[in-house]
Amino acid sequence: MRVYVLNGVNLDVLGRRDPAHYGSLTLPELEGKVREWGEELGLEVDCRQTNAEGEYVGWIHEALDSADGVIVNPGAWTHYSYAIRDALELLSVPVVEVHLSDVEAREEWRRTSVVRDVAAKTVMGKGPEGYREALEFLDKL
């Protein structure tokens, strides 16, 4: 099973962002853990990050023909990018929305997710372990 893990805007500066919300891992460290967890489950994991919304949408389009599951953490795009939401809606494979922080317990604007209704599952507030939960969910389908 091939799983795309698509991290969005500002996730490239993990380790420098507020550790109370995002933890202390850098993006390369997080991706290493995600790949390790995927390997333990027998999954092929392809991790990607971008600050360019069009590139993110392009990766979702690529997943149409090459992924068996997709994990998304669009970052701030979660709250307003209908372009990403519309691209995700095209997928026939399961999508899991992941957020390192508990967005429901933060600022009001963060509580809106335009991608949630096209996701099979949402995981939030579990830090890096949320990605493990998402991989395990996809593995069981």
Image (cartoon, helix red, strand yellow):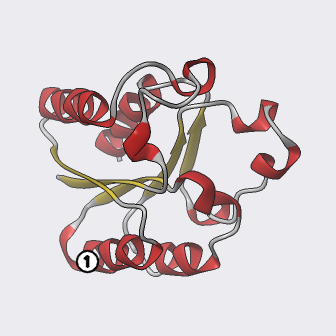
At 50% from the left and 24% from the top, the residue drawn is 127
Nearer to me, 63 or 100: 100
Return the x and y of residue 133 as percentages of the image width and height: 42, 30
For image coordinates 46% across by 29% down, the residue present is 16
The residue at the far front in this view is 16
Identify whether 67 is placed above or below 98: below
Name which residue lies at 25% across and 77% down.
Answer: 62
Label 1 sits on a secondary structure element that is helix
Given residues 104 and 26, the one toward you in this image is: 26
Is 17 on the left or on the right of 28, as rendered?
Answer: right
- Amino acid type of disc 1? Glu
Report x, y in % for residue 36.
Answer: 16, 28
Residue pointed to by mark 1: 62
Q: Nearer the viewer, residue 122 or 100?
A: 100
Q: Measuring from the top left, give residue 51's x and y in whole percent.
A: 42, 62
Which quarter of the picture shows residue 79? bottom right
Quarter residue 50 falls in? bottom left
Residue 83 image offset from top left, x and y in percent: 56, 80
Residue shown at the point (58%, 44%) measured from the top left: 122
Is 31 situated above or below 10? above
